[in-house]
C-alpha cells in the first residue's frame, strides 16, 4: 500500500459567521474521516481560506483516483463550502 496527502483549499460561501463556518468545517472533517482509505484529516489554513489535508492509503493509481473522487463529491455536497484549489504529490500515486 502507498500513502499520500491530498490538500484541498476551500472557500466558505455562507454568512460571515465564524461559529457557523467552524461548525460546517468540523462536520466536513468528520464526514471525510469516515471514507474508506482516509487515514487522517487535518484542518489547516486561515478563516478566510481554510484548507483540509487528507492522508490516504491506496493500492494503485486507480484506487487513489477513486478516493479522490469520493472526497471531491463529499466536499461539493457540503453546503456553503466550495473548492478553491487541489494538490497532491503525483509521484506518490504513479
Image: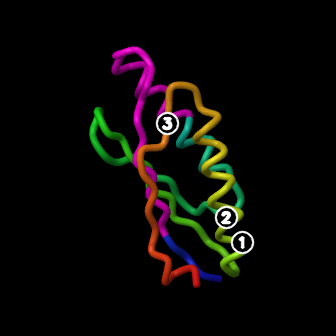
* Alpha carbons under labels 3 and 1: distance apart: 24 Å
- Residue 79 as seen in the image, left or right of residue 87: right
Mark nearest the camera among 3 and 1 is 3
Mark nearest the camera among 1 and 2 is 1
Circle 1 residues within 10 Å: few <14, some 14–19, many ≥20: some
Residue 23 drawn in magenta: yes
Pick the quarter of the image with the C terminus. bottom right
Range shown magenta = 5-27
The residue at 50%/77% (across/down) is 90
Is label 1 in contact with label 2 (beta carbons under 8 Å)?
A: yes
Circle 3 residues within 10 Å: few <14, some 14–19, many ≥20: some
Up the image or down, 78 lies above or below 34; here it is above
Q: Which mark is residue 37?
A: 2
- Residue 51 as seen in the image, left or right of residue 30: left
- Image coords of residue 42 (percent x, y): 43, 52
Q: Determine the secondary structure under disc 1.
A: helix
Mark nearest the camera among 3 and 2 is 3
Q: Which residue is mark 3?
A: 82
Up the image or down, 84 lies above or below 68; here it is above
The residue at 29%/33% (across/down) is 47
Q: Which residue is mark 1?
A: 63
Amino acid at each position: 500500500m502507498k500513502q499520500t496527502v491530498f490538500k484541498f483549499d476551500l472557500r466558505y460561501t455562507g454568512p460571515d459567521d465564524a461559529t457557523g463556518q467552524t461548525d460546517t468545517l468540523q462536520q466536513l472533517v468528520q464526514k471525510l474521516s469516515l471514507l474508506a482509505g482516509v487515514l487522517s484529516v487535518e484542518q489547516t489554513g486561515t478563516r478566510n481560506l481554510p484548507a483540509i489535508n487528507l492522508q490516504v492509503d491506496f493500492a494503485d493509481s486507480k484506487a487513489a483516483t477513486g478516493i479522490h473522487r469520493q472526497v471531491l463529491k463529499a466536499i461539493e455536497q457540503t453546503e456553503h463550502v466550495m473548492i478553491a484549489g487541489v494538490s497532491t504529490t503525483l509521484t506518490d500515486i504513479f
